Amino acid sequence: MFYLAGNLKIDPVVAGFIGSLSLIIALVSSPLFGRIYDTIGHAKKLLFMSGIAAAASMIGIAIASLYIIIPSIIIAGFFLSSGFVIVYAKAKQINNLQYEYQPLAVSFVNGISLFGAFWIPILFSFVVNRLGYSVAWVLGGIVVILLILPVLKLK
């Protein structure tokens, strides 16, 4: 993570390890969220709560303290994984009666996800260049909150 190495002057190897914590945690938490979703079944509530927690953790990354950044990265990885698990599971459930269309539903969700994710690094880099990392992380968290709010209106 350039943020850790450049701004906080952390060794690049250590910064890379810290940055990868979100991916490692996501690998562990994805099956957990699958189990939670299968048990609870309230996709809207789980997505909303996970989105708010992920947004708050992203905002926490803006604080230039490793004591806050490391837990924030771990929390972000934990809760962001739920978004993928729940959305893909829900897409598959929509076509339960038409089994042959389940891969199409999942690939459609994946395509939308990839298209949306394509813009994030570009916009983040633009904000970093203009306003700095802290503002970019806070704006990123606010954008997640704004994008998660419409989930409450879903049926």
Image (cartoon, helix red, strand yellow):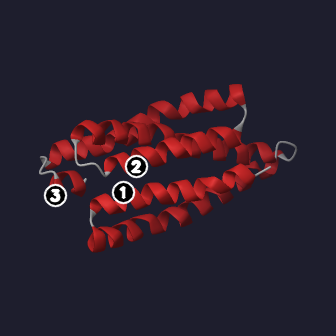
Which residue appears at 65% of the width and 47% of the height? 87
Residue underneath mark 2: 58
Disc 1 on helix, strand or loop?
Answer: helix
Query: What's the CA distance linking mark 2 and mark 1?
Result: 6 Å
Q: How far is the residue under mark 3 from the one under mark 1?
A: 15 Å
Q: Are marks 2 and 1 in contact (CB under 8 Å)?
A: yes
What kind of element bears circle 2?
helix
The one of 110 and 139 positioned closer to us in this rendering: 139
Q: Amino acid at mark 2?
A: Met
Count of numbered labels shown in the rendering: 3
| Nearer to me, 106 or 90 | 90
Residue at 67% x, 56% y is 150
Whole-percent x and y of residue 67? 24, 36
Going from the N terminus, do you reach mark 3 or mark 1 first? 3
> Which residue appears farthest toward the right when viewing the image?
97
Q: Nearer the viewer, mark 2 or mark 3?
A: 2
Q: Is residue 65 above or below residue 151?
A: above
Q: CA distance from mark 2 to mark 3?
A: 18 Å
Residue 78 locus on image (x, y percent): 46, 36
Q: Is residue 36 left or right of residue 103?
A: left
Residue at 58% in and 40% down: 49
Corner quadrant of residue 90:
top right
Return the x and y of residue 149 as percentages of the image width and height.
63, 54
Q: Amino acid at mark 1?
A: Trp
Q: What residue would you read off at disc 3?
A: 6
Q: Where is residue 82? Give x, y as percent.
A: 56, 40
Residue annotated with mark 1: 137
Q: Residues within 10 Å of mark 2 (few under 14, many from 20)?
A: many
